[in-house]
Amino acid sequence: MRQFDRSLPMALLKAREAVMRKFTPHLREHGLSAQQWRVLRALVESGALDATEIAKRCALLMPSLSRILQNLERRDLIVRVAEQADLRRSLVSLTPAGIALFEKIAPQSEERYRHITEKFGYGKLELLYELLDELVEKLEDDAAA
């Protein structure tokens, strides 16, 4: 069996924690969790989405997403509107307050990305993205087979 600290899950967790240490403090300053920020970012990039699509894009389980959406809705950062084609489904979109919060946080987030890119190197970071995407694709292919 592999050494504990050389297992892929541990390496991925350590990398995630190192990266999130750069982002979490400034998200907390604005009362957001990393998961809430992912939802806001997905909505900024894609516009209105249904919960299933948000869960998929943000790598969130539906029970967690339900709590996140309730919190963001209470804070008037998102709004849910029944979809005209299927009134059982609702589309989630950002409110003006949600857009304003995103616009306030995004430059700080970009600064952290610049720092990480500086430390790790643009080429290596792009290669890492490609390798992680390929790993996900290969493992999802296994699950489909």
Image: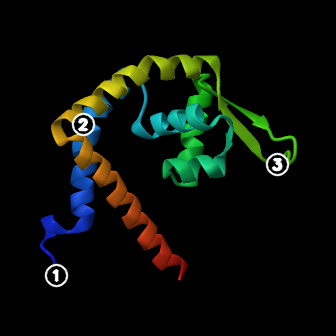
Instruction: Give amino acid for label 1.
Output: Met
In this rendered view, identify the residue nearer to me: 113 or 101: 113
x, y (%) of residue 116? 23, 36
The answer to the question of whether label 1 and label 2 lie on touching residues, with beta carbons closer than 8 A, is: no
Quarter of the view holding residue 131:
bottom left
* Mark 1 vs mark 2, CA separation in Å: 34 Å
The answer to the question of whether label 1 and label 3 lie on touching residues, with beta carbons closer than 8 A, is: no
* Mark 1 vs mark 3, CA separation in Å: 49 Å
Quarter of the view holding residue 29:
top left
Quarter of the view holding residue 98:
top right
Q: Nearer the viewer, mark 1 or mark 2?
A: 2
Q: Earlier in the sequence, mark 1 or mark 3?
A: 1
x, y (%) of residue 70? 60, 35
Query: In screen coordinates, is 54 left or right of 106?
Result: right
Quadrant including the N terminus: bottom left
- Would you say residue 102 is visible in this rendering? yes
x, y (%) of residue 18? 21, 43
Label 3, residues with CA under 10 Å away: few <14, some 14-19, many ≥20? few
Q: Which mark is residue 117?
A: 2
Q: Nearer the viewer, mark 1 or mark 3?
A: 1
Q: Earlier in the sequence, mark 1 or mark 2?
A: 1
Label 1, residues with CA under 10 Å away: few <14, some 14-19, many ≥20? few
* Mark 2 vs mark 3, CA separation in Å: 43 Å
Q: Secondary structure at mark 2?
A: helix
Q: Residue at x 19, y 33 (%)?
A: 118
Q: Which mark is residue 88?
A: 3
